[in-house]
Amino acid sequence: MASKTAGRGRQKGTGTVFKKGNRFYFQTKTDGVRKTELLHNDDGTPCTTEAQATAAAARINKSKRDLDAIQDHKAAVEAIAKDRKLIASLTTTPADIWETFINSPTRPHDSSEARQRDQKRVIDRLVDWCGRQTPQITTMDEVTAEALAKFLNETYGGLSGRSYCEAITIMRHVFKHTSKALGLDSNPAESLEGRALKTKSRKEFTPSQVQAILQGFDGGFFFDAEVVRMTTGRNHERVVKRLEYRPEYPEQFRLLILLMMFTGCRCGDACGMTWEAVNFATNTITFKPHKTAESSGVVVSLPLHPMLRGGLLEAREWKRDGYILPDVAMRYENNPTGIYGTIKKIVKCATGLEVTAKDGEGRGAAQYGAHSFRHSFVSFCASAGVPLAIVQQIVGHKNPSVTEHYFNASKEAKQAAIEALPDIGAEVPQQPKDITADALRMKAHDLLDKLPIDAIREIINLYMAQKTE
């Protein structure tokens, strides 16, 4: 009787070849699991001899060795990549984030300068926060989702939900284009959650409140504060003292308020306004609101209110760098929050209004501030019966229902809207007594704009007659 192992051949560690019936098979065992397959020749026919079976088994083993080599190489590459990533995360610091982002080949390059400033401001605050931790966060492997959540709560926790969520959006975007270069496994800001809050809309001022604010620049801004005073015998007592708040660059802040009050523009647009926007000859101011510059491209052009015109004429004394408010513009670029804070202090001292909500709705939300002047502009126009469509055009809102024809024909309506605004009870600043040649020419342009056409013809005829004499 033939042996049970007859017809079988074996190569140690490479599986077993055996014959069953008139066919040859190859059996292997991997991780305790047996696998059996029919052996074939190169042309696909079943092997019928032991030599054919041995050759087929050898081909299978070679393929397996090649595959193992590839997998070993892949594992080695992955290990090296992991080590390199670990090294990168241990050698890069939070201070490298911004430069890495700016140099990232995947970063969109169509962002506005203002948007880049907002992004850099958030990253700068993050870097500063990392340096103030105990112990300090010095390498990127420590910039985790948990660390970013703590940074948000400590830095933006007292601000509005909008500011909080905007910071998250910026960090997600920045880390999306820097995580790999910084050696991070994933975007640490991806899992951060926004904060849903009730927010309060800014409240508008009354004409008398605006008047009190403007008069404060002449009479001063005062507030009551509780201070500790030394008494006899080294004792202390708390007393309420009347103190004065003196804003930096008061003349420029007064004009900033006039710009917002009589054009309805946002604070950022007013701070960055240049003299190119002002045309004294046509008595107009023209600007493109930053918020809608990329989406709708709306350009706002409207007549100068007498109070705003007077303020702009005075402002030519400090004219430099192209900005109407040069020092305020610089402060806004470096620290816009400081500008908003100064305006809140001015408002509170001049009117006694509580600038921040205290009823729990919209944690830390501002009730009165720079944006209140924009609301006041809209409110005053509405009270004067100015049509809503006209107001929307003046404040720069995109309104698809308003046709281009209506827009071009609305100059008179805009003039009526500006004339409907109150004078706020303040004296209109007069032109300087020592008038310059340029100012004299501008005044002549202004007078010509108001003269009837017949009077203009008569002046020209008189001039030409004198010239020919």
Image (tube, helix red, strand yellow):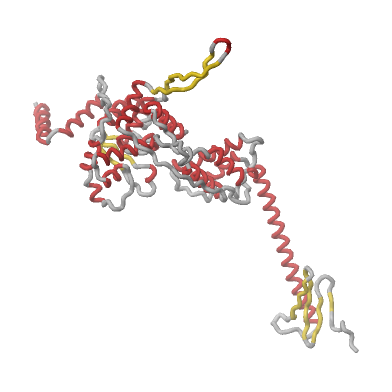
- Residue plotted at (68% across, 52% down): 82
Q: Is residue 238 above or below residue 294?
A: above
**Where's residue 270, x and y in %?**
36, 35
Where in the figure is residue 141, as x and y percent of width and height?
A: 65, 45
**Could you tell whether 127 is left or right of 266 in the image?**
right
Query: Which residue is pictured at 63% across the width and 51% down the height?
Result: 185
Name the image quarter holding the C terminus. top left
Residue 112's place in the image compared with 447, above or below, is below
Q: Nearest the camera: 182 or 301?
A: 301
Where does the image place residue 54, in percent across and percent down from the top left?
80, 78
Residue 269 visible? The answer is: no
Residues 278 and 149: in front is 149
Q: Residue at x 52, y 47 (%)?
A: 194
Q: Nearer the viewer, residue 401 or 39?
A: 401
Instruction: Give the total number of marks visible in the rendering.
Output: 0
Q: Is residue 340 visible?
A: yes
Residue 300: horizontal and vertical position, in percent?
30, 42
| Image quadrant containing the N terminus | bottom right
Picture quadrant where residue 212 is located: top left
Spot the residue most to the top. Answer: 232
Residue 339, by quadrant, is top left
Q: Which residue occupies the extreme right position in the image?
A: 1
